[in-house]
Amino acid sequence: MNKIKLIYHFLKTIIFYKPFTLCMGSKVIICNPILISCKYLRFGNKIFIRDFSRIEGIASYDGIPYSPIIEIQDGVTIEQNLHLTSAINVVIMKNTAIAANVTISDINHQYVDITKAPDKQAIDVDAVVIGEDCKIYNNAVILPGTKLGKHCIVGANTVVTGKSYDDYSVIVGSPSRVVKRYSVEKREWLKTDKNGNFIN
């Protein structure tokens, strides 16, 4: 993106988005979002969000009120077509990079009543935390309840199930599994079982 376009999107962010957020630091650039729920957003500094993002807080669903908070910390970069929805809490921590076409949500539709379409039924919610310095590759899906430690890698097309993953994990597949993790004690990358335990 050339300098003139960057300046244009920077000024637009300051004028049209920043006044309506919970807070926004300096040097934040949001390019042409499809939908953005500013009043539920906390932004740090030096954030770049490319075109066609949907960043939406869900304050009410099926008659039930929710209190969404979406927090994007310093140095986060997000490529095009992010789909992020939250009814409780999604946190993307410092210096994480998110590639194109990624979905992140703390919402899961119930499927209890067969007389109703699933998207007309109540929702379950569970907070999502993506740790510092993570890399989320193209087309990944981050499901409710996911907690990524710092320096995690999520491979392309991975569906990350709602559980906790240790720092320095490499996560791939659908459903997701850990294939290797950095050992601080041994100072090297080691293979793991699907739960992230080191294989001797």
Image: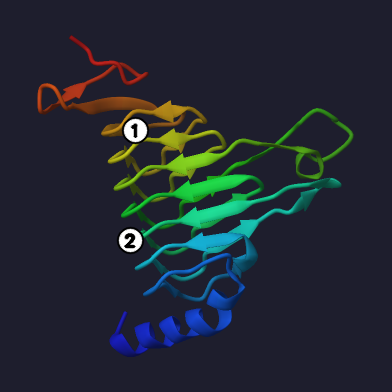
Determine which residue is flagged by label 1. Answer: 171
Label 2 SS: loop
Cα gap from disc 1 to disc 2, whole angstroms: 22 Å
- Residue 195: image x %, image y %? 37, 18
Label 1 sits on a secondary structure element that is strand
Between 4 and 172, the one nearer to me in the picture: 4
Residue 188 horizontal/vertical position (percent) = 11, 28
Circle 2 Cα neighbour tier, 10 Å, few/some/many (<14 / 14–19 / ≥20): many
Q: Is residue 150 above or below residue 175?
A: below
For residue 11, which numbered disc appears in the image?
A: none
Which picture quadrant has residue 7? bottom left
Residue at 17%, 23% (x, y): give it: 190
In the rendered image, residue 173, in percent from the top left (x then y), is placed at 39, 31
190 and 47: which is toward the camera: 47
Q: Is residue 2 depicted above or below 136 in this figure?
A: below
Q: Residue at x 33, y 46 (%)?
A: 132
Q: Is residue 171 above or below residue 132?
A: above
Locate residue 83, reporting x and y percent: 54, 55
Q: Looking at the image, is mark 1 or mark 2 nearer the viewer?
A: 2
Tell me, yes or no, if residue 34 can be seen here.
Answer: yes
For the C terminus, the quadrant is top left
> Which residue corresponds to mark 2?
75
> In the image as oriented, which residue stretches furthest toward the bottom?
4
